[in-house]
Image (cartoon, grey):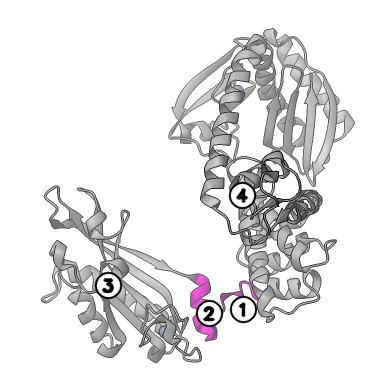
Amino acid sequence: MMGNWSLGDYFKKEQISWFWEFLTSELGLPKDKLYVTIFAGDKKNNLPPDVDSIEIWKKLGLPENRIFKYGPEKNWWSRAGVPDNMPAGEPGGPDSEVFYEFTQVTHDKKFGEKCHPNCDCGRFMEIGNCVFMQYKKAPSGDFQELPAMNVDFGGGLERILAALNDDPDVFLTSVFKKIIEEIEINIFSKFKYTDKNVQYSFRILADHIKAASFLLFSGITPSNKAQGYVLRRLLRKSVMQVYKWGDQKSKISTLINPVIDIYKNSYPEIEKLIDMKEIIDNETDGFMITLKKALDKWHKLLSSKSSVPGPVGTELVGVGPSYGPITPEEVFEFITTYGLPLDIIVNDLNWTGDFKKVEKLLNEHKTKSRAYSVGMFKGGLADHAVQTIKYHTATHLLHQALFDVLGSDVRQEGSNITVERLRFDFYSIKKLEENDLRKIEEIINQKIKESLPVEFKIVPKDEALKIGARSFFREKYPEMVKVYFVGSYSKEFCGGPHVKNTSEIGSLKIYKFEKIGSNLYRIYAK
Ligand SMILES: [Zn+2]
Ligand SMILES: [Zn+2]
């Protein structure tokens, strides 16, 4: 420890000095446009103001009139929020935030008499913060200093760039601008980014296509589950913007070009995205058709609504237009029939009804259909379980055989098994040919004939990866994993169930294959 610094202020000094040097020397942001906020203390919880930080900022040369103090709702961090909400045992602490002032933005008095860093008028933008994990809440409700303190730093890349440009619009920074320009030229060609009523859609499209690109780049494809569903929603929302302002034939997949341009120096691998345009096209072309149908129905529904009530009694027998706005029940019906997301109905079609009610109906619906499919599984599939277990075990042989025949870049993209057949999707750089299929089939049937035992071991994940067990790269695996061995031929991360010996599978015939995207193939086998 140095001089009269306490442990508490020593760790803050290191962090704040580094941050200041980064902003002012490395990036060269003008010092007179930077403001700082610090924790003003919380009397109710006996938490003192963060005077350490004030002193540190002052020593670094920041004048006191650019250091603003705020209470726990602004300058305190814990997982549970303000100190009052923290459960016993939870760590938390004050934070110090740095703001950039855009002097060209005039303060708007509707946000308060005087402007200040946390004002919402847009003159100030937070560009980074340091959270000092300094305290722990005791069961008594008192706050005690943590024996080991640490700092969480958070900085916004786009925001810091906006500050460097001295322009608050993050969509005009170098990590977005090319995408916006491409939208202006090729998607919303009748409009300019500066057109106020279209600007919001420009931004949605630029943001969503970038997010979608990185999901694709990480190996996610559109689906109805988990990450795949997030990707699907991003693309659907993008298609909605094209429907509103663009030529409906224009392809948002062209926006992959500026995304690659922006990121190829930092992520050279991103050029692979060029091969994934087809995946975007398949998804967005399909949704454009669905969307047109759905919107047509939506407008019919709207026009069936009258603002004038019909004669008394007609509403009971459903004669004539129904009276009043579209109800949550009707929106629910609409969503389940036409697959239009609620978000589009609220934000793009401007439906102003009770969306919480619709969410509730949708959740009930989801629970019901889940219960239904579980019932199906018990009633229908259980009788055929032996067959599906055989097919599943065969996918292990198929996965390894693909690897042997097509090369080490093969990776599983998904599989689907019914009692009738197995379906297996995979990625391969080598083009799949008919004679490859025959070779693959031969290997599998050979391994079936060899009557290989199917066994599993539970091992640490690292060890499983070290011995080269095939994993489904999209899955997040726990520390200990189950690895299935088919003789010494195949090793694969799997939860089961499987046959005990490959001889039980019988034989396997690949009866169909198709290309479902660039470097993406689908195989059907019986
Ligand atoms: Zn203001
Ligand atoms: Zn398995």
- What secondary structure is marked by label 4? loop
Splitting the image into 4 quarters, where does residue 30 fall? bottom left
Decide: marks 4, 3 in contact (CB < 8 A)?
no
Q: Which residue is mark 1?
A: 172
Inspect this view and state whether residue 275 appears: no
Quadrant of the rendering where the N terminus is positioned: bottom left
Mark 1 C-beta to ligand 1 under 8 Å: no
Q: Amino acid at mark 2?
A: Ala
Start-end of magenta stretch: 157-178
The vertical placement of 500 against 12, above or below, is above
Splitting the image into 4 quarters, where does residue 178 fall? bottom right
Q: Of the two numbered discs 1 and 3 on the same chain, state the one appearing first in sequence.
A: 3
Quadrant of the rendering where the C terminus is positioned: top right
| Marks 1, 3: nearer the viewer | 1
On whether residue 11 falls in the magenta region, the answer is: no
- For the residues marked 1 and 4, what is the alpha-carbon distance in whole angstroms? 40 Å
* Badge 2 density bin: few <14, some 14–19, many ≥20, Cα 10 Å: many
At x 80%, y 71%, the residue is: 186
Q: Which residue is mark 4?
A: 327
Q: Main secondary structure of the magenta part?
A: helix
Decide: marks 3, 2 in contact (CB < 8 A)?
no
Q: Amino acid at mark 4?
A: Thr
- For the residues marked 1 and 2, what is the alpha-carbon distance in whole angstroms? 8 Å
Splitting the image into 4 quarters, where does residue 176 fall? bottom right
- For the residues marked 3 and 2, what is the alpha-carbon distance in whole angstroms? 26 Å
Q: Which residue is mark 2?
A: 162
Q: Quadrant of ligand 1?
A: bottom left
